[in-house]
Image: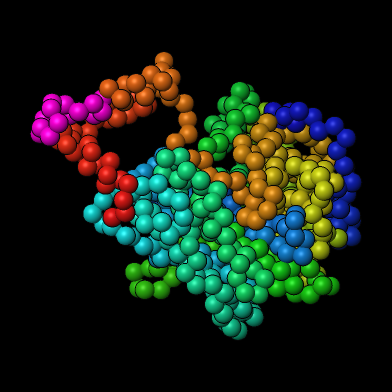
Amino acid sequence: MTPISSPARGGRGRRGLAGLVCAALAAGGLAAAGAATLEPGAAHASSHREAPLISGTPQYDNTDVYAFVSPDKPDTTTLVANWIPFEEPAGGPNFYTFADDAQYDLHVDNNGDAQSELIFRYTFSTHRKNGKTFLYNTGPVTSLDDPDLNITQTYDIDLIRLRHDKLVSKTRLADDVPVAPSNVGRASMPDYGRLRSQAVYRAPGGATTFAGQADDPFFLDLRVFDLLYGGNLSEVGRDTLKGYNVNSIALQVPNELIRESADQPVVGIWSTTQRRNARGGWSQVSRLGSPLVNEVVNPQRDKDRFNASSPYGDAQFLTNVTHPELPRLVEQIYKIKAPAEPRNDLVDVFLKGVKGLNQPPHVRPSEELRLNTSVKPSAHPKRLGVLDGDNAGFPNGRRLGDDVVDAALQVMEGELVGAKNDLGDAVDANDRTFEKSFPYVAQPTSGSRGPLAKGTDGADVRSRLDDALEPGGSPGSSDTVLIAASAASGAAAILLAGSGLAWWRRRMRRPY
């Protein structure tokens, strides 16, 4: 790609998304007037800190949604939704938990009417073993029921079935499933992979679920907000989310459970967060489907309203899609001519799905992440998905490795209407390798990661700490000892009684 680009793609499949969309437009695809039949509703967007209100409440902030046919189990679909952006791995002592006063919902529209037919609802409870310590864990944690894990969470899952937005049934799929904890560090969690595996739960009926911390799978250079990469393309190529974690919910379900029929295999996916309000009811505060919508498509005046709305009411945001701001900004800064408006090509792809691929019959245009569950996983996935001839990738759902920033930017700049380009942010892959089986997201970055203080090595630090931990005075005396205990800077100090150090070591080795 070229900055707002990266290396050129070589022989890219031009018969992919561009060909499908051109055929759809030629066959009478959605016109602006037809799209105006949309209306307001209840739930989505995709980004980190994408709206003013939600940016102040990260526990409820849904950062991204993924939906893909499971690569190792193609008779199932995997849904992944993430919350709490920019989790600093060492951000204790209060590490990262799902909110107890929230409903985390995964929505499925299986007939294209822009309403939920299925909702998978996750609700969480936090448990504390000992309130007399500030510690998240009081010793090495080797299992999810380890007495040294002081703060734990569990969750329930309900499957809610609806028809025309009316409740049909509600079924409990799982009770008290343990959540994988935050990855405090190697000393606290010497085998985090084991903890993760214990958090994978197989529910009756063929569903598999996971909730817990994970590496943030979204990869991009977020410095786009500094006048589109510095105003001169000097700020591209750095994965801004490298090293940060998120709280992740992953759910793998049989295809037959979520789709309307074998003849109609396309489903629309989005997620919402509802928070208990002052009256004891629920208010939707976050909504997310396709990536980047509320972040760079909706203007400031619409962002909070979008988070509180549903796909059924998306007509109110139609002008943001047909007359997008981003191409005009690119033209202003980089002199790349913006495609002519109204942008019906964007309406067709992002509000209806690609005709012949992931557009359901009688679709009501709305912002959902649409997936054709009958398309088999690619043996060799291409990061640009459908744009590069790989029909198993974005915007046919979204896989963890899909480069949605480059794909969306190229389409936004007119790839489908004759303005061929290789625009991108020069970040083409995630910093951590995704797993080959459920839950697929990479393990979270450990809180003990990172370089030592400049000018030091491990031996130097250990030597300094050994000196600091030498008892002061004779055995059994009450002389105080200053322990310089920061490997990074030597700045943290703990004042202990002479015999207190031995007590502390013994205390840390036993459960409270």
- Above or below, comparing residue 485 to residue 352 in the picture: above
Which quadrant holds the N terminus?
top right
Which quadrant holds the C terminus?
bottom left
Viewer-side residue, 507 vs 295: 507
Q: Is residue 482 magenta?
A: yes
Instruction: Farthest residue to the front: give it.
Output: 475
The x, y position of residue 107, in whole percent, is: 61, 67
Q: In which quarter of the view is residue 169 placed?
A: bottom right
Viewer-side residue, 295 vs 291: 291
- Residue range (magenta): 468-483
Q: Is residue 103 visible?
A: no
User: In this rendering, would 486 be left or right of 20?
Assistant: left
Q: Is residue 152 magenta?
A: no
- Residue at left offset 51%, top offset 46%: 191
- Residue at left offset 34%, top offset 21%: 463
User: In this rendering, would 494 be left or right of 80?
Assistant: left
The x, y position of residue 131, in whole percent, is: 26, 57
Q: In which quarter of the view is residue 121 placed?
A: bottom right
